[in-house]
Image: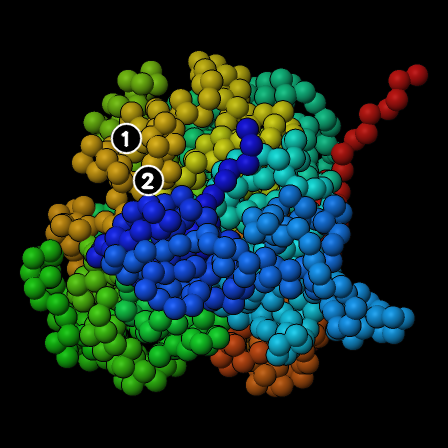
Amino acid sequence: MGLVQEIDYGTPASTSEKQVTLTVDGFTVTVPEGTSIMRASMEAGIAIPKLCATDMVDAFGSCRLCLVEIDGRNGTPSSCTTPVAPGMVVHTQTGRLKDIRRGVMELYISDHPLDCLTCAANGDCELQTQAGVVGLRDVRYGYEGDNHVFKKNDGAENFKWMAKDESNPYFTYDPSKCIVCSRCVRACEEVQGTFALTIEGRGFESRVSPGMHQLFIDSECVSCGACVQACPTATLSEKSVIKIGQPEHSVVTTCAYCGVGCSFKAEMRGDELVRMVPYKDGKANRGHSCVKGRFAYGYSTHKERILNPMIREKVTDPWREVSWEEALTHTANEFRRIQYQYGRTSIGGITSSRCTNEETYLVQKLIRQGFRNNNVDTCARVCHSPTGYGLGQTFGTSAGTQDFDSIEQTDVVMIIGANPTDAHPVFASRMKKRLRKGAKLIVLDPRRTDIVRSAHIEAQHHLPLKPGTNVAVVTALAHVIVTEGLFDEAFIRERCDWDEFQDWASFVALPENSPEVVGQLANVDPEEIRSAARLFAAGGNGAIYYGLGVTEHSQGSTTVIAIANLAMATGNIGRPGVGVNPLRGQNNVQGSCDMGSFPHELPGYRHVSGDAVRDIYETLWGVKLDDEPGLRIPNMLDAAVDGSFKGLYVQGEDILQSDPDTKHVAAGLAAMECVVVHDLFLNETANYAHVFLPGSTFLEKDGTFTNAERRINRVRKVMAPKNGLADWEVTQKLAQAMGLAWNHQHPSEIMDEIAKTTPSFAKVSYDYLEKMGSVQWPCNEQAPEGTPIMHISGFVRGKGKFIRTEYVATDERTGPRFPLLLTTGRILSQYNVGAQTRRTDNVMWHSEDRLEIHPHDAENRGLRDGDWVRLTSRSGETTLRALITDKVSPGVVYTTFHHPDTQANVITTDFSDWATNCPEYKVTAVQVGASNGPSEWQRDYDEQARNSRRIATLEAAE
């Protein structure tokens, strides 16, 4: 099998269209203008020795190994920093060059430990490799005198020596092995954009320093792994490699965390995962990673993972381990009983945004073909369902318009209700790189997120709007663009309905939509609104990126429509560098929507009422499908409380922790007679489950994920499922237990069925994905290579549709009892409900949810940083510790929802988006006060959870 090898060309590729021809060691090579001699040589198959050069960062020219000779030029220039020229004749291997390189390498080795046989990088050390390449056979210089290698010199303390830094949970820093090539520093700056590392000292005193001579764990390092990947020696080494040894084979797969969809090489030794290395050919991440995808995979082998099916009669009983056959037969019998007793629509299911497209497709197929109803929903209900509605109404399709590469041609970035540095960090790094090159930034967010002001980046405009006023502020931006004549009339006349535009323009031009009126309502300076609007309209290519701070509101769909209006009015649709881009939260939330996980839509966003669409599936599946939409998740819970909904199959979601108004969710689950949880761990929802089916991780299955840019990426099995079955196999066996004649032998067959029935996936197959690497839907005969950018020549719906966006204030209001507004979000080191990341060393950075509160509000309540506080709303109360910060505005508090012992969603209300029922997580009126300990609800919940997680032990046979 072997390791997947990637060529390191030494320097980045040139984007020039002009070609240059030169000669390298007698071979003619033609490359784009601006290409370095080093890269041109590598493209000709000639590898020039190097240490400080790598194609992930710009050329540096410090190691002096890559020297070459050029006819007609004096000296020996470095090949990494010297661009090619027409007719250039280059020599890479002459007697002079060989002598210089051996001499340079000899100096490096003279201040480097010679513990190669026991070094963690043995077999994967560029210094070791290059020493062999240049023919180094002897080191004439001893270790006497100054060195960084030994703790003591002649019995005295060696103050140039530094102890190994093992503070980071995932990698070590050994200064004694550092050759000061600066690759780690440059990777931190150029690739990640954190600027956490520097070179301190001069000359022989130089060394890499995290922050201000700090430990890695105490510095600004975000543990993305870029420095470890860049390091040519064992100076920065993964602890997993130190413990296990070098990997011997690898498989390319896709990360199972956020919606960026990074490609990784899972590097293995036998069936043990050694490390995850970002794949340079991954079109979503281009060789970069974040702390979650790079390092936080330990949950797959965590001791709390459940590997055997379990059942119980009542949720107060302990779990009983059973065979797969017994668990699936019991589940099928219970679902049949419930439907016989309560009716066909008394059961339903929830698909997973963490499972593959194929697995999600099978769950909705089971519900429609097996349960014979449309009671299927997905976690997108509580995150991006307004995106589907809003973009579907305006553009005609329910997804983002661009690929991630588009950011490289953006002139003005507008971020609305998103925190990409924490929730989508790899894409955020690409965004920051573009901003450092001169693109302008506008941020609409109640908080001062990290991207508003960070290393070498500061937003031109930050509009810290009051939670709940998104529609008003985006409409005010449109007011300025319309009233000042900044709209793109030619684009609108060609691509949109002019009459609808005129109607919309007359609406946004009304005085009540002016920045002066809206600014007072939203607590934003009117001049900032005006300046931001002018910049977006007149600043060149304008791209809008938005997140859950847009959708999770009572007017979430309205805000998405307002964003689409803004993009169409300025002509920022249908070309690179522009567009409307929802930043999807989970790895396959886009795919779960594509696969028909909504109760009103079949795969491909086709309404269940369409006779022609239903006929496709009725013919294939051999059953009559219901033409009425089924129940959404909130409706299922309401119906359960009312007594008409009694059974639920939940694959890979934790609705008790993730959905709003936790008490209502608990009441709904408690009222059901058969709750089946299919997951890796006994999550919070499993507290109310009667059947537990153990799930498989992304490492243990084949399939595909679809990321936020509509990119369909392969997920490849790198180890056998520890629970015995991949998730698609579990769903298929459940379908078979219910009498369905499913017989898929491999997930590729499921994708073939998807392609056969879904026009936007018509050309997608595993063979085609192997050939292309990945594709972005639509991928069919009209777009055989996929569609990186949507709506180039026209909108999917024909003409783009302008729609009025009336601002309607949420019913959730502040008052004397609840004077503050709570909004929620995520943090870099944790993911969603934390089921995976809480079971890794990422807890070192975020071991608990904290409540961010402004110093003014904290002082008024007598609170200090770290104090336990009681957070109370109309729905409930919880306690957590305060974090006093001016990142939030006065009157606004903020927390995350990663830890179940906090259960932030016991605070949130049941208010939701008018069109999609997406919950209003981002606006909850609360009060904050000092606390002496957990709330009564937390104590009761903890007791119930502990009781519910008991597993009966088998008594030993006599």
Of the 4 image quadrants, the one containing the C terminus is: top right
- Horizontal and vertical percent for residue 500? 11, 60
Q: Residue at x 64, y 43 (%)?
A: 123
Name the residue that disc number 1 marks. Answer: 763
Q: Within 10 Å of the Cα at label 2, are there few (<14), some (14-19), or many (20+) other Cα atoms?
A: many
Q: Nearer the viewer, residue 698 or 357?
A: 698
- The amino acid on which the numbered mark 2 sits, given as a three-letter code, is Val
Name the residue that disc number 2 marks. Answer: 775
Q: Is residue 409 visible?
A: yes
Tag count:
2
Q: Is residue 470 visible?
A: no
Q: Is residue 409 shown left or right of residue 860?
A: left
- Horizontal and vertical percent for residue 467? 42, 71
Q: Earlier in the sequence, mark 1 or mark 2?
A: 1
Q: Secondary structure at mark 1?
A: loop
Q: Nearer the viewer, residue 829 or 43?
A: 43
Query: Would you say the residues marked 1 and 2 are in contact, meaning their CB atoms lie under 8 Å apart?
Result: yes
